[in-house]
Amino acid sequence: MTEMREAVAGSLGEDRHESGTPHVEFLGVGKSYDGVTEVVRDLELTVYEGEFLTLLGPSGSGKTTCLMMLAGFEAPTAGRIRIAGQRVDDVPPRRRNIGMVFQNYALFPHMTVGGNLAFPLEVRRIDREHAAQRVRRALELVRLTGFEDRKPGELSGGQQQRVAIARALVFEPNLVLMDEPLGALDRRLREEMQYEIRRIQRTLGVTVVYVTHDQQEAMAMSDRVAVFNRGRVQQVAPPEVLYEEPEKGFVATFIGDNNLLHGRIVAAKGDVCVVDTGHGIVQAFLVAPLEVGDAVTLAIRPERVALAAEPGLYSNEFEAHVDDIAFLGDHLRVRVGVCGSSNFVVKIPNRAGHGAVLEDDRIRIGWTPLDCRALAPDKDEGGP
Amino acid sequence: MARALIRGRGGAAAGLRAWALVVPLAAFIGVTFVAPLGAMLTRSVHTPVVADALPETLRLLGGWDGSAAPGEPVFRALGQELLAAREARTLGQVANRVNRVEGGLRSVLTRTARRLRTAAPSPEAAPGAGTQPDATRTAGAPAPWRDAILGMDEAWNEVATWRAIERAGERFTGRHYLHALDLDEAPDGAIVAQPEDLRIYLPLLGRTLLVSLAVTALCLALGYPVAYLIARAPPDRAPLLLLLVLVPFWTSLLVRTTSWIVLLQTEGVINDLLVAVGVLDQDGRLAMIYNMTGTMVAMTHVLLPFMVLPLYSVMRTVPPEYMRAAASLGATFPAAFRRVYWPRTLPGVAAGCLLVFILAIGYYITPALVGGRTGQLISNMIAYHMQQSLNWGLAAALGGILLVCVLALYLAFDRLVGVERMRLGA
Ligand SMILES: Nc1ncnc2c1ncn2[C@@H]1O[C@H](COP(=O)(O)OP(=O)(O)O)[C@@H](O)[C@H]1O
Ligand SMILES: [Mg+2]
């Protein structure tokens, strides 16, 4: 919104994860509402200036709680939060200068769009003329020029969403929090808004902490994604790293599809290990600090599994029984039983030759050790 | 109904069935509400007692010029009809009515009727049938009724007496309404205000409106924070808090009133306490009951739930995100409250205020019990005229005016706030 911000935005490269000035720091943060269950545990997370960071996780995993602690509506029960290097424990929400977009927008229904946008400026005692100008620019930014006099109730869901974003930006905060802002929109509008939010964030160079349970949305928008499960961060990484190099079984299955096999390491050499699944020996790529004898979880992407046209092509090759075939246009989704897993999915691209697969048939499938990641089994899968 | 009939036979049958379901309620309301209300409003303008009892007198008085006491035929009609009324035991009512028009005439009428019973002129003394008598002039002709009645009471020689009978004989009258508004009809028919010291009803009505307003404001000031607290309470605690609000509702009126007396009387708990801690000295004890203070305290207490409940049900529907959003936008709590929360609760505020005000304006029992002499409201005056003075016409007129006040208020409210925006429940 200011020239300075635009300059900042311009100077920020595409690839700026894990670098730059820390903007928000969660230092060992924990939260319990009832003193018994910890809904957020040992949270260590740094958000860098100008970064778009997404908290991704299933419903109830503590994402909103993190956002509320950052905004100042909830107090951490352990650890501390720093914003721009300052501890914020004693700073009330209204002094944190954080823009917030709520899931249900929380637009004030009795005020016009202009009134909603002018509200944060009025409480900051910014003079009328300036305020009107800023309101106009904010509406321009979200492409709603001329909507000042409408009431929120007269707008479509997407338009209300834009107004909510404009209101969170109009007082020029440098940190913006969004809690599932697109949850109420249909798919097409959601994709359009994902792009819009990203565009606006790039234009202004603000730091955004975004919450969603939709992994595609997180992948499409974020510089980095923090994957939450049961109040714990599982992995913080750029989307492509999360997909290609998941460090936990939960991440491997939550980001895209993954087949998990369980077994025990029987031999290891460098990055490669040999795993006994009890129903076959698999060679895998060792990413966790595990040793021979340890239990291990293997993650194999469905699209990295291929039909073996002739034996000996892959170092991991198995006979599998085809339980089910689903035709999904660009690919076939074949469910097979292999290595003790009855729910192993193979994605076969729709091109000549796929017709060879028939239900109840036996086929040969294979994958390379590099496409088979050996992870430490998730310890806390049992309970919170 | 008409639409349902147009929709075709199936629709018509369904429409009829739907209406049939409402019939019991409609009948109930008709019998218990519309009919009494209609009867009351009729009574406030319909005064048939004198007209029914003295028809011939009134007919003959129609031709009277009003400059002096009328002639023999009028006296004869009056005498005969007074006797008949005495026989029919309606004389008391007639005398009462006339007395309300002109004070002191009750005894004149009853005494005259009593004396006529023993001293009425014989029927033969009447002028011969067939000759149309001149109603107003007596010029020389024998006038046994006139002489007899004039001899019984000097008042019959006064023009004012006859005028009073004439006016009491009007079958329909706005007099009760004039009276209820502290107006009077001068002899020349002009409507004039009562002298300052005789005005009773308008000041009382004004006081009632003021007290109702004050009670409404008190209820709002006390009830709003309570409703806010309950609406924000965790779901397991809200019902308990709501219960506390409703307890006074369920307590017997007499128990409550007695408690107020124990607390507020001059030798009561509060005064004792204030004296004990030295805020007041023994002679400075506050009079907090049997006056307007007592009325206001007790009414506020009784009506508080009517404010809290609509407020609570509206507040529950205001998402907490609004206040959070306002805070995140930089607003202090007072600013967020004033600009965001308060406007969202206005429908509840409106509903609660309207409810409390309308209940307060017709409040009767509490002022009667704890209001003393100065804490009485218009309803107590209506009750007085119903039960003590038996001037039902005036009571009905006062009731009618109260009704008009409430309706006017409702319409004004509708204009300002919009009744459809008002919410009693979620
Ligand atoms: N105000 C609250 N009081 C008590 N428990 C809460 C409150 N808010 C959230 N929780 C609990 O904390 C857990 C995490 O909730 P939340 O942070 O909203 O998760 P998410 O946003 O990831 O869906 C949930 O089990 C939820 O029931
Ligand atoms: Mg949430």
Image: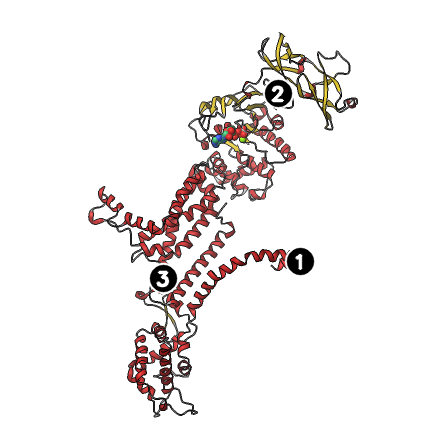
Please give the name of the residue rendered at 54% of the width and 38% of the height, measured from the top-left corner: A135
Q: Which residue is mark 1?
A: B9
Residue B413, given in percent of the width and then of the height, sits at: 47, 54
Q: Is residue A244 above or below residue A153?
A: above
Residue A335, given in percent of the width and then of the height, sits at: 70, 23
Type of amino acid at the residue the image marks with label 1: Arg
**Any mark on residue A298, and which?**
none
Say which chain tag 3 marks.
B
Q: Is residue B155 above or below residue A167?
A: below
* Mark 3 Cα-neighbour bin, 10 Å: few <14, some 14–19, many ≥20: some
Q: Is residue A293 above or below residue B314?
A: above
**Any mark on residue B383, and which?**
3
Please give the name of the residue rendered at 61% of the width and 10% of the height, measured from the top-left corner: A265
Q: Which residue is mark 2?
A: A252
Residue A237, given in percent of the width and then of the height, sits at: 58, 20
Type of amino acid at the residue the image marks with label 2: Ala
